[in-house]
Image (cartoon, rainbow, N blue to C red):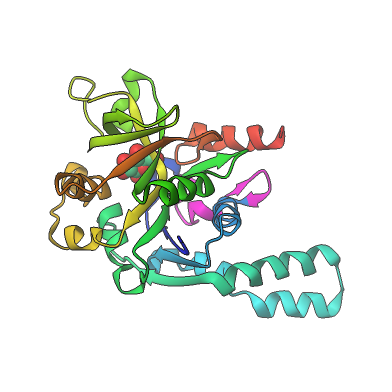
């Protein structure tokens, strides 16, 4: 059973400047609700019991968001606004499940994952990248189902335009299992159009094995001078670990870029 999830939140959010110059991008509202709450709801509805946030001292605002008890209590005491009571209950529900670890130097997603090593107690865990919203269908739940059926690592996947492959991690496909699931042979981080093994991209939902920490420990920075989770996954595939790409059913919203972020509120508003 997948019971633990990790969420890297220490990134600087430069693609969303100026909104992120003093504000954590994950708290920016998307149709009136902070982006991170969509991610938390997805986790909790998928049966996750413990969520590890990887933050940095520059992003303590995220921790404060879940620890404003005094503010809520004093407001509720003064006026018993049912909306505020409900919001506070929701925050308390999230807070009970969240643990915080720190990545103070942004050295990439691989390094962020490594920071959670001593907290991961199960053989497999879920990772969600908060820039990637997937709506209409719970993608984490679908990945967990694939994992349980095949006892393998799983990543969310989507076909992208050939000309945009250098924005993503791109898979090399090995074998089709069914309409949505493929065993993969490899994955490369942000390849050039010429070197891309396909146009199937990794989207930010992963079920990873605990043994990935052994690979991350010795991994050197690569593209953009960052330690990439993609490179650790490739090392595991070289060791014959089975990885499945799952073409998810929901709608993907890229909230990590300015156009994508603006568009996401419009799409959710129309739901
Ligand atoms: C990260 C991953 C990349 C993946 C993408 C999905 O990139 O490194 O492999 O395709 O998320 O959104 P980033 O968005 O941090 O540049």
Is residue 34 left or right of 209 when viewed as pictured? right
**Residue located at (29% from left, 57% from top):** 106
Q: Is residue 149 magenta?
A: no
Is residue 100 left or right of 221 when viewed as pictured? right
Any part of residue 95 in sight: yes
Closest to the observer, 124 or 25: 124
Q: Quadrant of ligand 1?
A: top left
Image height of 59 relative to 193, above or below: below
Q: Is residue 19 magenta?
A: yes
**Residue located at (21% from left, 51% from top):** 232
Q: Quadrant of the C terminus?
A: top right
**Residue located at (64% from left, 69% from top):** 93
Residue 197 location, x and y as percent? 22, 25
Residue 63 location, x and y as percent? 51, 69
**Residue located at (51% from left, 70% from top):** 98
Residue 99 location, x and y as percent? 46, 72
Image height of 202 relative to 71, above or below: above
Closest to the observer, 132 or 62: 132
Any part of residue 189 in sight: no
Is residue 92 left or right of 73 when viewed as pictured? left
Closest to the observer, 120 or 130: 120
The residue range painted magenta reads 18-33
Would you say the magenta stretch is mainly helix, strand or loop? loop
What count of labels does the image hold? 0
Residue 40 location, x and y as percent? 56, 57
Is residue 230 left or right of 133 when viewed as pictured? left
């Amino acid at each position: 059973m997948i019971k633990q999830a990790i969420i890297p939140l220490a990134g600087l959010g430069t693609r969303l400047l100026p909104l992120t110059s003093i504000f954590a991008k994950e708290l920016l509202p998307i149709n009136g609700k902070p982006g991170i709450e969509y991610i938390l709801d997805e986790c909790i509805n998928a049966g996750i019991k413990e969520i590890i946030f990887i933050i940095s001292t520059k992003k303590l605002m995220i921790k404060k968001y879940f620890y404003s008890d005094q503010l809520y209590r004093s407001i509720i005491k003064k006026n018993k606004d049912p909306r505020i009571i409900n919001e506070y209950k929701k925050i308390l529900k999230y807070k009970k499940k969240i643990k915080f670890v720190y990545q103070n130097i942004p050295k990439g997603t691989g390094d962020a994952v490594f920071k959670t090593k001593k907290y991961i107690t199960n053989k497999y865990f879920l990772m969600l990248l908060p820039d990637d919203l997937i709506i209409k269908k719970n993608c984490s739940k679908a990945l967990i189902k694939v994992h349980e059926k095949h006892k393998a690592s799983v990543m969310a996947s989507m076909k992208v335009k050939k000309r945009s492959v250098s924005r993503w991690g791109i898979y090399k496909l090995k074998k089709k299992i069914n309409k949505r699931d493929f065993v993969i042979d490899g994955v490369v981080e942000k390849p050039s159009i010429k070197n891309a093994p396909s146009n199937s991209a990794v989207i930010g939902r992963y079920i990873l094995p605990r043994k990935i920490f052994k690979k991350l420990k010795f991994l050197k920075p690569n593209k953009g001078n960052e330690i990439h989770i993609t490179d650790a996954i490739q090392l595991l595939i070289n060791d014959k670990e089975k990885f499945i790409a799952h073409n998810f059913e929901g709608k993907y919203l890229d909230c990590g870029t300015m156009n994508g972020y603006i568009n996401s509120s419009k799409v959710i508003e129309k739901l």
